[in-house]
Image (cartoon, rainbow, N blue to C red):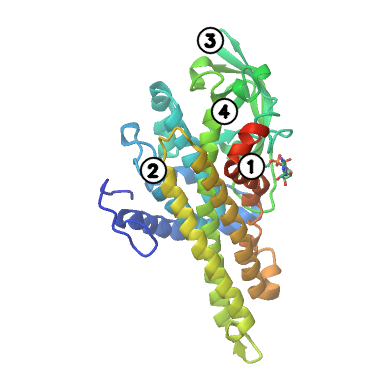
Amino acid sequence: MIEMTHGSTAVQNDHGFTADQKQIFEAAEAFARRELYPLAQQMDENEWWPPGLFARIGDAGFLGVTVGQESGGHGLDYVSAGAIIQAFARWNHAVALSYAVHDNIVLDNLYRNSNANQRSQYMVDMIAGRKIGALGLTESGSGSDALGSMRTTACRDGDYYVLNGSKMFITNGPIADVLLVYAKTAPDLGHKGISAFLIERNYAGFHVAQKLDKMGYRGSQTGELVFNDCRVPAGNLIGDENNGAKIIMSGLDIERAMIAPICLGVAERAYQMAIEYSCARKQFGQPIGSFQMVQSMIADMYVHIETMRSFTYRTLSECQHRKDDTDRSILHMMTAASALHASEACNKVLDNALQIHGGIGYIWETEINRLYRSIKLLEIGGGTNQVRRMIIAGEALSDIRSVNYKTDARE
Ligand SMILES: Cc1cc2nc3c(=O)[nH]c(=O)nc-3n(C[C@H](O)[C@H](O)[C@H](O)COP(=O)(O)OP(=O)(O)OC[C@H]3O[C@@H](n4cnc5c(N)ncnc54)[C@H](O)[C@@H]3O)c2cc1C
């Protein structure tokens, strides 16, 4: 799939993509409509993950998107990665979520932070989709205050670290083979005493305590992970000991940037369905789309989607251009704002789309209902919209903050 020239002159199309990015988007869209859409209903009904799906996505060339070619990836940019996520989300948002966690939140993170040994040991199988990735930060007692309240510990014992604790709400957790997990190596140092580890599912002392039954994004597997004297080779420490907060923070910025294209894909599909229904459904002898109040809802949906699209890709483009910046305050603010805006705009689009469908939209097994049930997660996951507002205001008021106020919340 991803056969493209690098560094081509940026010929913009209507959506602001270069010709290469447009080609990637179209390939991902065709794949998602053909391969992922037919799975969506069953995934939603049964919280079912199709076995072997990551390998099929890998075979189609959609894994390792931002990983350098020297490490077996495609070496593409964050805009291209977002385009694939948007395309997948149009047709199967549960797969898009699991995909974003594997390819972006884990693989991109590992590529940026792991050493040559770790890359060669894990990345080939992950890019082929033979091994699935998950990221464990949240715990039942530490969500928004993920760093400050973290209870999972890792103690050095010879050539191993011994992990104890648990992680909650972990996407891909029940099916993951490789888990990027954060634990406190120096609890007295607060967020400066956190380290990142790669854990394999067959390590003694690790198990999945439960698979969670969700309201939306059903089929994307979510679980609770437990570490009970889990011995992890010291070679699986990612980055330096006690340097995990930096890895978490840079990862969270990219994670937030990738939330927006999921929202965009879901909103686009809902909009398309609302238009089709407005033309097909007749009341008072006319298509409901001929009524001005229905037209008003459609117009509002269009405005939300186009503003979402602009901000989503502007933010992803900034992520690419500023990826080596040491000062991350602009990215921190923009990615929080992009996720905040997209999740709230998606919520409004889905509210109108379901309203246009009337009673049938309220029925659980309809597609529009499935889309509607997706809206809350991305106002919560990766840091809630309240936390995103804290980040934006914190950066906007950073001069005051440096004098009066400091928090190590999931910022
Ligand atoms: C389906 C799903 C998948 C997930 N996947 C992952 C994953 O793969 N990996 C991972 O590590 N985590 C994952 N999460 C966890 C997610 O990131 C957290 O749920 C989220 O950060 C919120 O934490 P919490 O649920 O503990 O809520 P809490 O932090 O308890 O917040 C509860 C409420 O209080 C508000 N609040 C908290 N602090 C403040 C404050 N200072 N000011 C104002 N309001 C505040 C919040 O905004 C929220 O409304 C997932 C969650 C879900 C539901």
Q: Secondary structure at mark 1?
A: strand
Q: CA distance from mark 3 to mark 4?
A: 23 Å
Rounded to the nearest whole Å, what is the CA distance between mark 3 and mark 1? Answer: 31 Å
Task: Give the residue at the far right of this rendering.
Answer: 141
Q: Nearer the viewer, mark 3 or mark 4?
A: 4
Q: Is residue 275 above or below residue 218?
A: below
Indicate if the residue with disc 1 has its beta carbon within 8 Å of ligand 1: yes
**Disc 1: which residue:** 222
Q: What residue sits right under mark 4 in the picture? A: 245
- Vertical side of 343 occupied by 130: above or below: above
- Give the residue at x 30% y 57%: 19
Q: Counting residues from the N terminus, which is met first, the one under dot 1 or under dot 2?
A: 1
Residue 159's tag is: 3
* Discs 3, 4 touching: Cβ within 8 Å: no
Q: Give the image location of residue 230, x and y in percent.
A: 63, 19
Spot occupied by residue 68 in the image (x, y as percentages of width and height): 34, 36
What's the residue type where badge 3 is placed? Answer: Asp
Residue position marked by numbered label 2 in the rendering: 321
| Position of residue 286 in the picture relative to residue 22 (left or right) | right
Pick the front one: 125 or 374: 374
Mark 4 element type: helix
Disc nearest the viewer among 3 and 2? 2
**Three-letter amino acid code of the residue under disc 2:** His
In the picture as drawn, the residue positioned furthest to the top comes out as 158
Residue closest to the far bottom: 285
Q: Are marks 3 and 1 in contact (CB under 8 Å)?
A: no
